[in-house]
């Protein structure tokens, strides 16, 4: 009777955990999409700032002068590049989490599905076997 109660508690808790895990995966995929969009949005401002800086640097018949405008353009290019690098680093981290999290979630779902199927066919087994499999899926 105690074994059946433990089994029911874990099986009731798992759907919530599975739903929460799937929501986290969806959030992660949305974050990756937003980061890709943000990185793409940095391309045109970067090209514009670099073009303006290059045009200012290579003006015909005008000496190169280092003034506030020149420094401002250099700072703008550096800021956009730093922002883009930061976004790329966040994207890399998110993709790493996605790569490592996907197979773990899939394996857990398969193990729990197999255990649920086995318990319906064979009936209740030993306490150690059933709880250890479901606890590993929940965690």
Image: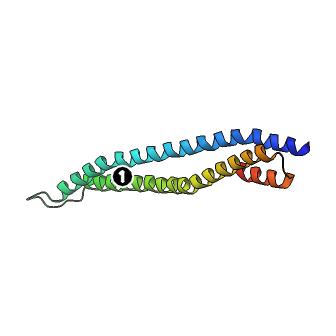
Residue 83 spot, x, y in % from top left: 41, 52
Of 53 and 72, nearer the camera is 53
Q: How is the image coloured?
A: rainbow
| Whole-percent x, y for residue 119 in the image | 78, 46
Task: Using the image as rendered, state which of residue 50 and residue 94 is in the foreground.
Answer: 94
In the depicted view, which residue is nearer to us: 78 or 10? 10
Q: Nearer the viewer, residue 128 or 85?
A: 128
Residue beneath the point at 55% across and 55% down: 97
Across and down, in percent, residue 32 comes to: 47, 47
Q: Secondary structure at mark 1?
A: helix
Find residue 19 and report its image quarter: top right
Image quadrant occupied by the N terminus: top right
Image side of residue 84 versus residue 22, left or right: left
Q: Residue furthest right?
A: 1
Q: Residue at x 65, y 48 (%)?
A: 109
Above or below residue 119? Residue 99 is below
- Residue, far bottom: 63
Q: Is residue 55 left or right of residue 49?
A: left
> 2 left or right of 119?
right
- Residue 34 is situated, as x and y percent measured from the top left of the image, at 44, 43
Please give the count of numbered marks on the rendered protein.
1
How packed is label 1: few (under 14 Cα within 10 Å), some, or many (20 or more)?
Answer: some
Give the residue at mark 1. 80
Does 1 appear above or below 85? above
Q: Residue furthest left?
A: 61
In the image, taking residue 39 as reference, residue 15 lies left or right, namely: right
């Amino acid at each position: 009777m105690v074994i059946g109660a433990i089994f029911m508690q874990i099986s009731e808790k798992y759907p919530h955990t599975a739903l929460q895990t799937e929501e986290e995966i969806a959030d992660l995929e949305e974050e990756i999409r937003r980061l890709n969009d943000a990185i793409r949005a940095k391309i045109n401002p970067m090209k514009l700032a670099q073009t303006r800086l290059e045009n200012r640097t290579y003006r015909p018949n005008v000496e190169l002068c280092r003034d506030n405008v020149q420094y401002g353009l250099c700072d703008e290019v550096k800021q956009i590049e730093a922002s883009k690098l930061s976004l790329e680093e966040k994207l890399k981290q998110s993709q790493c989490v996605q790569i490592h999290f996907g197979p773990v979630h899939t394996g857990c779902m398969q193990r729990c599905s197999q255990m649920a199927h086995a318990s319906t066919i064979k009936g209740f087994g030993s306490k150690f076997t059933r709880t250890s499999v479901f606890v590993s899926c929940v965690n």
